[in-house]
Amino acid sequence: MSAPSPFVPARPDSAGRTDVLLVDDDARLAASLSQLLRRCGYVAASVGQGREALEFLASHPVALVVSDIFMPDCDGLELLRALRPCTSRPRLVVMSGSNALHVPGMLGAAQMLGADRTIAKPFDPAQLLDLVREMIGPPVSPPPPAALSDPAVS
């Protein structure tokens, strides 16, 4: 029997809403960021690559997608290209930190392909929370007081 996947199941809340979909092949990072967002009052889910994100988006309304660039099968740039022509697409934030020499160029390419914002790894969780608030507003549920106690994300 294999160990359970740390990816957060892609389930909207009871109202059918998902605030943030995290797309990253680093299962621990995606699960950690999803958990942080949920603790802060957002409805968050995560998937491991772009093709899974497209499948999720086909059947669930999502306000914001936060995607890594470098992933197997369907990477973040392919995800952006697939979502670009959609008239009702979610807001898009692209993150990367795989190779410090290529990050600025890749994040710039992501903006040219339609990313609304970008964020370079490593980042402080508070930076991501500020970006999420800026992109989609405050959560529907108020966050608990200790929600920002996580260490920096790398």
Image (cartoon, grey):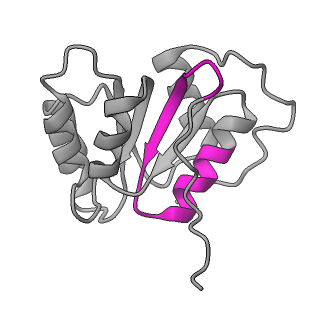
Q: Which residue is drawn at 29% across and 40% down?
A: 54
Say whether residue 82 is magenta.
no
- Horizontal and vertical percent position of residue 56: 38, 39
User: Is 92 drawn above or below residue 146 in the view shown?
Assistant: above
Q: Give the range drawn in magenta.
A: 13-35
Q: Which residue lies furthest to the right in this view?
A: 145
User: Is 1 drawn above or below residue 88 in the view shown?
Assistant: below
- In the figure, is residue 78 to the left or right of 151? left
Nearer the observer, 119 or 42: 42
Nearer the observer, 129 or 81: 81
- In the figure, is residue 96 to the left or right of 81? right
Q: Which residue is drawn at 85% across and 30% down?
A: 144
- Horizontal and vertical percent position of residue 122: 49, 55
Say whether residue 19 is magenta.
yes
Nearer the observer, 9 or 78: 9
Quadrant showing the N terminus:
bottom right
- In the figure, is residue 14 to the left or right of 144? left
Q: Residue at x 16, y 27 (%)?
A: 84
- Horizontal and vertical percent position of residue 108: 19, 39
- How many marks can you see? 0
Nearer the observer, 78 or 146: 78
- Horizontal and vertical percent position of residue 94: 33, 40
Q: Which residue is drawn at 56% across and 38% down?
A: 11
